[in-house]
Image (tube, helix red, strand yellow):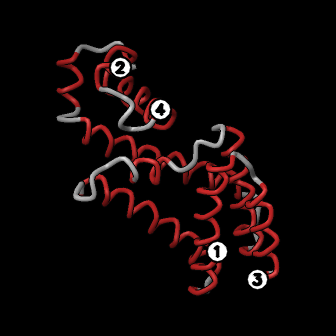
Amino acid sequence: MLPKERILDKAFVLFHKQGYNATGINQIIEEAKVAKASFYQHFKSKEDLCVAFLNQRHDYWFNELEKFSLSKKDSKVKALSSFDFLIFMNQKENFRGCSFLNILSEIPSDNVKVLNVIQNHKSDLRNYFKNILNDELLAAHVYLLFESCIIESQLFKSNDLIEQSKKIIQTLIL
């Protein structure tokens, strides 16, 4: 594996598990087994690495969501299955929550470079629901429930609210 890939692999794990601020460049360099010069050859700053991480996380997360809901042909069932996907991810990642929201809480409000990546991810998620439901108001409602489930399940280390939200969504769309 090339140094850049090793750096991104380590950042992928460490930023998600430990958080952005708690993960130092030296730890990434050490665990990726690359020279400091090699790190800076690929990433000018920790911020640039963060942007690369979030872009990689975006692709990973949407690919996992697509794989998870691939067998669901009905759009309403597909929207509902996205909540099962949250349960799956919570179990897989031990209720770590959303990398994008976690990093949003760690960056200064004027960090436009990282903020744009986070906003684009959330816009893509809103569009995901809009595209499968073909109803803008309903999609906004599902999106807001989905986002609140991410936060609440991380906070309480529980999928209970996700299960309740699935029942709410069933009454809305089925």
Q: Residue at x 63, y 56 (%)?
A: 66
Query: Is label 1 or label 4 in front?
Result: 4
- Gap in Å between the C-alphas at discs 1 and 2? 39 Å
Disc marking residue 172: 3
Residue to which mark 1 is pinned: 142
Q: Is residue 148 above or below residue 156?
A: below
Mark 1 and mark 3 residues within 8 Å of each other at the beta carbon = yes
Say whether disc 1 or disc 2 marks the residue closer to the N-terminus: 2
Image position, residue 57 (x, y; %): 46, 45
- Gap in Å between the C-alphas at discs 3 and 4? 37 Å
- Secondary structure beneath label 3: helix
Disc 3 marks which amino acid? Leu
Residue to which mark 2 is pinned: 27
Q: Residues within 10 Å of mark 4 (few under 14, many from 20)?
A: few
Disc 4 marks which amino acid? Gln
Mark 3 and mark 4 residues within 8 Å of each other at the beta carbon = no
Residue to which mark 4 is pinned: 18
